[in-house]
Image (cartoon, rainbow, N blue to C red):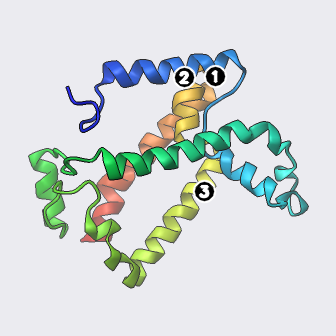
Amino acid sequence: MDLLNSPWPWYIAGPMISLTMILLLLVGRSLGFSGNFRTMCAIGGAKKVSDYFDIDWKAQTWNLLFLVGTVVGGYVAHNFMNADAAVDLAAGTVERLENLGFENPGSTFQPSELFGSGVWGNLSAIVILLLGGALIGFGSRYADGCTSGHAISGMANLQLPSLITIIGFFIGGLTMVWFIFPLIFS
């Protein structure tokens, strides 16, 4: 198996995630991405605007390294480990996406209809991106964490609020894919 040019199988990636969680639990930390935004706002002086940002941001610098590592890892993976950008989609999914106007669904990892440079010239696409970003930000703050924090850390800690939040994420995702997405692209 070529680990540099193919997705890692569950029996390698899963234990690595588990080992990371065990190490974080042993040092009293919890993994999550949205906390980085709070930390960056606190660094920028946002505590003058809201007490929510009145935190000891220096204690969260380890999580900022997680953010930097994710960005660097994404860059390395995209530029040096991406031999085949095609995605193996089910025939039914390909048919549905073609009916919605997508050209060659699955031929690239990111369809140009959603992520291409032409999106920036389309006002409705920009509104959708801004609205989606605002909803994700609101939901992440309201749920007191993001998908990675709740699904990986919260579930590993057997926290009931994380289970409830994950159920909400799945309901929201399914609603988007089955009902809202077809309305946007039909």
Q: Can residue 164 be seen by looking at this rendering?
A: no
Give the residue number, with chain letter if any, for mark 3: 137
Q: Secondary structure at mark 2?
A: helix
- Give the residue displayed 56% in from the left and 22% down from the top: 21
Q: Earlier in the sequence, mark 3 or mark 2?
A: 2
Residue 27 is situated, as x and y percent measured from the top left of the image, at: 71, 19
Left or right of 150: which side holds 175? left
Q: Position of residue 19 (x, y in %)?
A: 51, 17
Q: Secondary structure at mark 1?
A: helix
Q: Position of residue 38 (x, y in %)?
A: 73, 50
Q: Which of the two marks, 3 or 2, is nearer to us in this view?
A: 2
Q: CA distance from mark 2 to mark 1?
A: 6 Å
Q: List the residue tagged with mark 1.
A: 24
Residue under label 2, please give it.
20
Q: What residue is at 31 percent from the left and 71 percent from the top?
A: 116
Residue at 15% of width from left, 67% of height from top?
103
Q: How far is mark 1 from mark 3, CA to CA?
A: 25 Å
Q: Which residue is at the far front?
A: 80
Observer-nearest of 20 and 152: 20
Asked if residue 53 shows in the view, the reply is yes
Q: Amino acid at mark 2?
A: Thr
In the image: residue 38, left or right of residue 172: right
Q: Secondary structure at mark 3?
A: helix
Alpha carbon separation for disc pair 3 and 2: 26 Å
Mark 1 vs mark 3, foreground winner is 1
Quarter of the view holding residue 99: bottom left
Callout 1, which amino acid?
A: Leu
